[in-house]
Amino acid sequence: MQNVTTPPPDMQPPGHIRLRAMQEKDLRAVYKLEKVSQPRPWPGWYFRKKLRTSSCWVLEQQGMVVGFGIVAMVKDWAHIMNMCVAPGYRRRGLGRRILLHLLQIAKRHHASHAWLEVRPTNHPAISLYRKMGFRNIQIRKNYYVMPSGKENAVVMVRRL
């Protein structure tokens, strides 16, 4: 049964941003978004691998990928592996929308907790994660390889 408050996909207004499962055809756009958003992006082949082994989602507006999120299940835990929103679309609640969806998927897979790693300098992401109930549990030394050297990761966890 369709939700009466949401028009069918073919009747969505032109500015509507929809969340849908990532497909092979999205990989080029996802990688491009990763490259403009991360100082050390995942390689393109890794996204292809994750598409086969994880739950991968994109935010799309008029055929253009404006965000994505990837979650992997590890026993009864969910690992939020990667999330990204295009620079011109940030601060609109889209990161929150992706994260909520990934957490719903984790719950459907009976995960008891979700965890993620984040650069300590990524203040907007850390703020979002805290608002969404994530708490710092440890620092992983030299986790991220950056152009200027290595950077620690903050490991955050949330009970589902």
Image: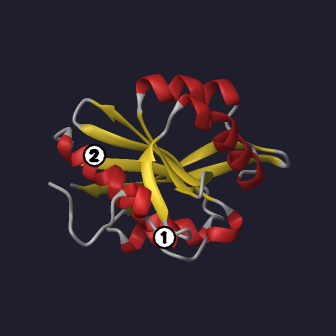
**For residue 27, side relative to residue 133 (left or right):** right
- Locate the C terminus by quadrant: bottom left
Q: Amino acid at mark 1?
A: Pro
Q: Amino acid at mark 2?
A: Ile
Which residue has dot 2 on it?
Answer: 105
Residue 30, given in percent of the width and then of the height, sits at 64, 43
Residue 16, given in percent of the width and then of the height, sits at 49, 67
Q: Residue at x 69, y 49 (%)?
A: 33
**For residue 101, side relative to residue 141 (left or right):** left
Tag shown at residue 13: 1
Circle 2/circle 1 CB separation < 8 Å:
no
Residue 26, given in percent of the width and then of the height, sits at 60, 38
Q: Helix, strand, or loop for circle 1? A: loop
Q: Residue at x 61, y 71 (%)?
A: 90
The quadrant in which residue 62 appears is bottom right
- Locate the N terminus by quadrant: bottom left
Q: Residue at x 70, y 70 (%)?
A: 88
